[in-house]
Image: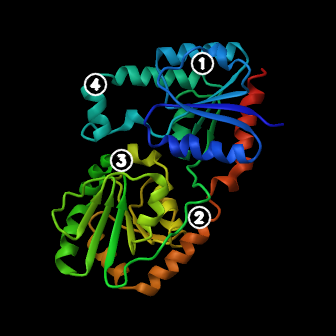
Amino acid sequence: MPLQIVSLVPEGAPSSLYRSFIPMQALALSGHRVHVEERNELGDPAQLRDVDVVHMFRLMGPGVEQFTRQLRDDGVAVVWDNDFDVSSAPADHPVGVAVAEAGIERELLAAEQAMLALATLVTVPTAELAERYRAAGAAEVEVLPNLLPPQFQRRGQAGADTTTIGYAAMQEHAWDYERVGAATALRELLEQRPELRLLAIGLDLGIDDERCEQLPWQPYDDLPALLSRCDVALAPLADVPFNRTRSNVKLKEYAACGVPWLASPVGEYAQLGQEHGGRHVADGDWVEQIGQLLDAPAARQRLADAGRGWTDGNCATSHTQVLERIFARADDLSDY
């Protein structure tokens, strides 16, 4: 039976694209009645009394807890979704710094714990975060990986006379980029290779060179065309507990655009390899590994072909049955 699902997400949260808009679109295409709304103030829960499932991404705090209790009392299933473990952010990481400066670490942890206990079901993008939440007392946790929309595909070609290294990430990833040696590697490679170009989308690489193009984060529909300009794309991650809960969606995006990737063997990235369109790079080996791939066009093509084959199965519309099972499970649990 079709479900009526309302998804509530914070205003201006980029990750809500993966955690709400894309999966909800797939459910809507499958015949479910879906509404997504960006809001920080939840309003009156009585307005959602006739909904089967209310999905909430990252929303938490006393007001959200009261809202959730009322929905549960009214027989509405609540699926609470979170995509990273704030409690494990290093003190000098941008997330850790922001939490410390706001003085809200205790409040955040208490609010997270409350939602783990109150929600009918919890969804997360990775098995590692699922295990952490189960250990923290969540009774029902499901892994819902970050998926791609069907239109996320290669658009265009890389330049014939230049070689471009791409890196798409939010600014917080500059912390990883510096720590694993990727920043030093790119500066060195620019000196070694006159034909080399860099394309950074979303973060500042800290490189003052006319061959380094740095763009703010772009509309998601424009991302495939930009990534398709690249010959190789990077995904450096420092090996810390915070990063072991992160999604592998960046590698899916690179692979879907036919761009071979080089990534740190950390968390979800460590489970992928050449059959998924890329290779792993140990800290300090970025110059050598990037150079080897840039000098091997046949190898890049093999990786590109493998990556596109892998991402064919990582479209949200290919996972509709998984999505339906998760939300139907939440609806069933609300009856008890």
For the residue marked with disc 2, what is the amino acid? Thr
Viewer-proximal residue among 41 and 295: 41
Tag shown at residue 102: 4
Q: Earlier in the sequence, mark 1 or mark 4?
A: 1
Tell me the SS state at disc 1: helix
Q: Earlier in the sequence, mark 3 or mark 2?
A: 3
Q: CA distance from mark 3 to mark 2?
A: 27 Å
Foreground: disc 3 or disc 4 = 4
Q: Is residue 125 visible?
A: no
Tell me the SS state at disc 3: loop
Residue 279 spot, x, y in % from top left: 44, 70
Viewer-proximal residue among 117 and 311: 311
Horizontally, residue 109 falls left or right of residue 173, namely: right
Residue 151 spot, x, y in % from top left: 59, 60
Q: Earlier in the sequence, mark 4 or mark 2?
A: 4
Foreground: disc 3 or disc 2 = 2
